[in-house]
Amino acid sequence: MFPVRLKVVMLCAFFFLLFSVVSSVSARSGSIPLLAVTEGSGAGLVAELELSVVSGSGEVFLNTYPLTKLSTQLSLRVAVDQACQELLVDCSKSDFMFTIRAPPGIVGGPSAGGAAAVLTAEVVGNLSRKYSSIVMTGTINTGGVIGPVGGYEEKIQAAARQGFKTVLVPKGALRGSNFSVNATVNITEVGTLRDVLERWYVYSPIVDSQTLLLSTSYAEAMRSVAEDLCKTVDDEI
């Protein structure tokens, strides 16, 4: 049997280690508002997306009730990858544990990706927000591009009801739209994750943006793909 003194030392060491782990997890967590629509009624609402980053092996987990679509879970993986690339951080030794808190009936889909990428960057980079009354909607894609979603009108109205002053939407989202928007809400279009971080946070990119020179044929091909995607987007989170 261990001497009493050794037992006390081991017990103190255990609680010190436990406290250190808990403190570390607490220090690497955060939350962000998430715009969504409800299935059936199509009403907009503001949910909550939470993230805890812990030591691990680069896994991404989603805990939510009710269950969301597979595309929601896949979008979170893309969100983590793009945020870590933007910050030039190696995230292979961390696990990312997301939680979506919302009433039953929200529509699942990839549009949680944009907010998830922003939240990941905030937690991993320990970024400070410049404003607290901003909310966003949009997918996250390769190159950090914020892509189109559905249900803009319902989501913007939900943001207005909750007192948000600014709603960030993907570039081109309101092109040709004819719905009325609450005058108290400022709608701002953003093209990339970097755009969002520079508007919302105290953030200076580590690497300056570079201008990509694209051939005319490639640009036209990608424009066609984007237009096809916009036509098939469903109302989703």
Image (spheres, rainbow, N blue to C red):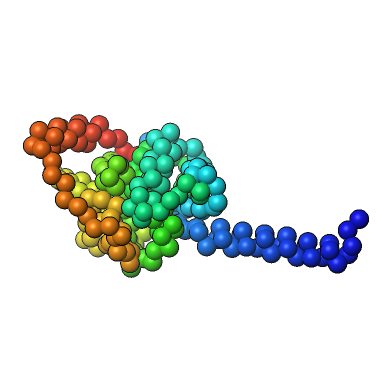
Q: Is residue 113 left or right of residue 67?
A: left
Q: Is residue 50 left or right of residue 143?
A: right
Q: Position of residue 14 (x, y in %)?
A: 73, 60
Quadrant of the rendered image containing residue 74: top left
As drawn, the residue found furthest toward the right would be: 1
Residue 143 visible in the displayed image? yes
> In this rendering, would 20 be left or right of 85?
right
Looking at the image, how many numbered discs can be counted on the residues? 0
61 or 205, nearer to the observer: 205
Coordinates of residue 162 in the picture (x, y in percent) = 36, 59
Q: Residue 29's spot in the image, x, y percent?
A: 50, 58
Q: Is 219 drawn above or below residue 209 in the view shown? A: above
In this rendering, the answer to whether 169 lies above or below 166 is above
Residue that appears at 49% across and 44% down: 58
> Closer to the camera, 183 or 234?
234
Which residue is located at x 47 percent, y 58 percent?
A: 30
Asked which quadrant contains residue 201, the reply is bottom left
Quadrant housing the N terminus: bottom right
- Residue 101, visible in the rendered structure: no
Residue at 41% across / 47% down in the picture? 80
89 and 185: which one is in front?
89
Q: What is the quadrant of the C terminus in the image?
A: top left
Residue 85 location in percent, x, y?
35, 49
**Which residue ends up furthest to the left in the rendered image?**
216
Pick the residue in front: 43 or 85. 85
At x 25%, y 31%, the residue is 232
